[in-house]
Amino acid sequence: MASNESHILVINSGSSSLKFTVFDPASEEVLASGIAERLGTDGAGLKLVDLAQKRHDEELPMTDHRSALLRIIEVLTKSGRFGVKAIGHRVVHGGEYFQEAVIRHRGRGRKNRRACEASSPPQSAECTGHSNCRRDFSR
């Protein structure tokens, strides 16, 4: 495991899944990764490799995106020193407001909400991912 305790967490929220990867920002080494899939169903589950390279596979019936993210954080925290320096979130389309990668901050929240409101239903999970990370990681 890398010695740097400030990791980069990258998430990708789909309509019924949440993929994630944790990177060491200095070396760009992948430290942990996984997927919570079939979210919102009785067959929902989480598969991941944690910071100690231990595999986890568990059922999470009827879990939503936020609960899955919180469970991922819990497993990662128990497996090693997990500190988040930044979060990257893949968004398919930013509407008329975002045509390229941007650093998200409070001043862009209104534009992000407008883009989410104008998006198709599959984008709603991505918008929820932004909100969950902001709520769960804001200091």
Image: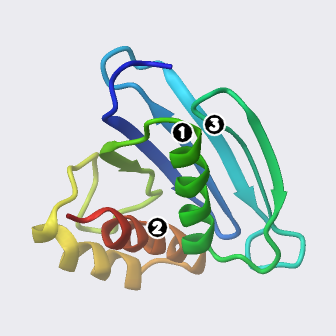
**Quadrant assignment for the C terminus:** bottom left
Report whether 33 appears left or right of 9: right
Mark carried by residue 21:
1
Q: Quadrant of residue 16?
A: bottom right
Q: Quadrant of residue 13?
A: bottom right
* Distance between the alpha carbons at the discs numbered 1 and 3: 10 Å
Residue at 65% x, 77% y: name it.
Answer: 64
Amino acid type assigned to the residue bearing label 3 in the image: Asp
Which of 28/138 is in front?
A: 138
Residue at 26% x, 59% y: name it.
Answer: 98
Q: Position of residue 44 (x, y in %)?
A: 82, 68
Structural crowding at the residue carrying mark 2, measured as other residues with C-alpha within 10 Å and reported as few (<14), some (14–19) or many (≥20): many
The image shows residue 56, relative to residue 95, as above or below, that is above
The residue under label 2 is 129
Q: Position of residue 77 (x, y in %)?
A: 51, 47
Residue at 54% x, 39% y: name it.
Answer: 21
The disc, 1 or 3, on the residue closer to the chain's N-terminal end is 1
